[in-house]
Image (cartoon, rainbow, N blue to C red):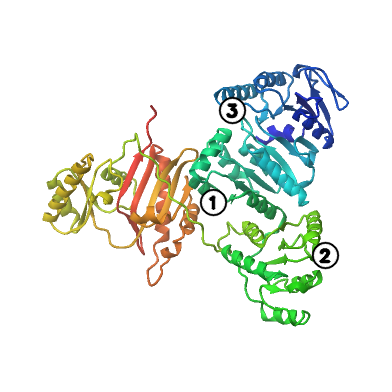
Amino acid sequence: MSASLQSLFHPRRIAVIGASANPEKLSFQIFRNIREGGFPGEVIPVNPKGETILGTSSVKSANDLPDGVDLAVVIIPAKLVPDTILQLGERKVRTAIVISGGFAESGEEGAALQAELARNAARCGIRVVGPNCQGVNYPYHNLCASWPLITRRGEIAIASQSGTVGAALIDWASEDRVGFSAFVSMGNRADVDEADLIEFFADDANTKVIALYIEGVKDPAKFLSAVRKCRKPIVILKPGRTERGRKAAESHTRSLAGNDAIYDAVFRQFGIHRASTLEELYDFAKALAYLPAPAGPRMLIVTSSGGSAVIATDVADEEGFSVTPLPHDLADQLRQFLPSHFIVGNPLDLTGDANAEWYRRVMTAAEGHYDVVMAIFGDPIPGASTIIRPDRCELVAYLGGADVERAERVLLGEKKIAVFPTPERAVRALACHARFDRSRFPREPEGQQPTRSTTEGREVLSPAASMELLARNGFPVVSFRHAETVEDAVSAARQIGFPVAVKMNALDVTHKSDVGGVILNVTDEAGVRKAFQAIGEISKRIGARDGGALVSAMAPRGLEAVVGVTQDVQFGHAVMFGLGGVLVEVLGDVAFRIVPLTEKDAAEMIAEIRGAQVLNGVRGGKPVDLTALRQLLVRVSDLVVKHPEIGEMDLNPVILYEKGLRVVDARVVPIKAPE
């Protein structure tokens, strides 16, 4: 697929459809930017009046274009675009950037125009960026079919659904002198989307990091295929974390924003760095592109600002770095040349007397003792740019330095050294290198809220039928029997052996314990009869469909967990794991992964929850069988791959033991049949 975008980024001849001689018009400005950006090939304006624009004669129609046009930049009224695409197809144009708005973002009529545009482009074999976009800027080919005109080259490729967001990023990168390798404003993504661009930039020699702003993934299967194959870091800012934010995202470009918990799980599963803010998107990409990865967690902080060092230490500890005391031999070496009033420790505070030479001598002496040295220039430090080496993991935060700081930041940027305006932004950006290496950089993961799907309009399997499905597929379930009558229940209890649990088997009650539908530790036949009668009365009182009772063995006490499946509207089935049993809704300590799962995925899910340490045994508790737990998660994944008709599933509780585990209760909801 990336080969089809070659003429988008490396055109030999460009046509600007709708170019104007009026300097106030956007079409004039884009034509001018292509010219002034240094594009090496011919740029042909297409203007219905045949005007001469910046000294270049125009042609009146796309039909009049000469052979050999690779790329068309289209800036005309939306209603004219679909037919213009057909004309470009006749002229063998291979790619088009449709700047024009008035498509799906504007309502049903615009959506119909966009669909026609996409059909015509597919028929003609034209790859289209947009519509409703801000264009493409690829400085390594001197191509700025966009605005503003920025040409500084770097190693970060930026693709954004929002033109303004992307333009802000390249502006920051240019101001910091680190530059960018490409900027693509995707707009409505009628054709070219984030997956296409990931695939292209994965092979682009000028790109080291891919940064994306997306409000939703257009084609989940294509996206997952692209990220699986990509060996370069990907950073994504995906808003819509809240319900209102999701609705705002969907109204912006009329694209699905999806379930945020599932997006979060997908990003974790495939090693994608998720940014929460625009600043993080820029910081993370900058660190991954221009800061060498640390070999380990040991960090030395050298500062002229004690307060900034305290901030950095807090964030370093949160992110899994170790701001450890100075080794004795290093401390002795530093005392030999540092003034006596300096506090020789870690952080090492050079105070307001600091100068670039003191930083240089300390950082040189510390080589081999630490994996990363953080230099916080908290004052005007002339010469700071001369001591930071781009090939070393030397993290720079520069703040409070006024004009000297601004001059030094420029010099550092010219050397392609990442500089951050605050210590916390610097450390969090550095942590991208450690985020997916938990063995060297342990960190408490963030909590996630469980996502529960609606079952409206879908037939739910009864608890008994759900347990039977699991038993047929080899799941380690407790002994159970379905009882339609009280005598069936008594007989089941005898076969299983006392004590037993007697549970409501209604199809339409999600949480049986909430209505008193679970009676535990029933020790004799009289107790079974009483429990069966009580469950029947509860069903009548709440208007539930009576499905008899589920009689099951009492599982030995252990650690309660929950394993589930949810069906995401974009990414399909996702497996969920968490602790708490009936408390899972309250604790909200869960992790997700989309199927199919590997044992590695399962292990990462288990390690990701906040309560993971409980699984290893705390305060005299015994560790649980993590191998059995991993196998259960993979088995759940395999089951929904085998039976894609399953929409939701809850195994709750699952009792974890030192050896093995048992599924005590289950609920399965098939996918709603299409109407």
Question: Which residue type does callout 3 highlight?
Answer: Ser
Number of disc labels: 3
- Measured as percent of width and height from the top left, residue 279 is found at 65, 51
- Measured as percent of width and height from the top left, residue 30 is found at 77, 32
Q: Nearer the viewer, residue 577 or 587?
A: 587
- Measure the C-alpha gap from mark 3 to mark 2: 53 Å
Specify whether residue 463 is in view: yes
Question: Which residue type does callout 2 highlight?
Answer: Gly
Residue 58 circle label = none
Asked if disc 3 and disc 2 are in contact, CB closer than 8 Å, the reply is no
| Above/below status of 343 relative to 383 | below
Specify whether residue 299 is in view: no
SS type, badge 3 = helix
Q: Earlier in the sequence, mark 3 or mark 1?
A: 3
Q: Earlier in the sequence, mark 3 or mark 2?
A: 3
Q: Nearer the viewer, mark 3 or mark 1?
A: 3
User: What residue is shown with label 1?
Assistant: 268
- Measure the C-alpha gap from mark 3 to mark 1: 34 Å
Residue 383 circle label = 2
Tell me: 396 left or right of 102.
Answer: right
Question: Which residue type does callout 1 highlight?
Answer: Arg
Asked if disc 3 and disc 1 are in contact, CB closer than 8 Å, the reply is no
| Above/below status of 625 relative to 517 | below
- Measured as percent of width and height from the top left, residue 138 is found at 75, 39
User: What residue is shown with label 3?
Assistant: 106
| Above/below status of 429 relative to 204 | below
Question: Which residue is found at the position 68% from the left and 27% from the top?
Answer: 100
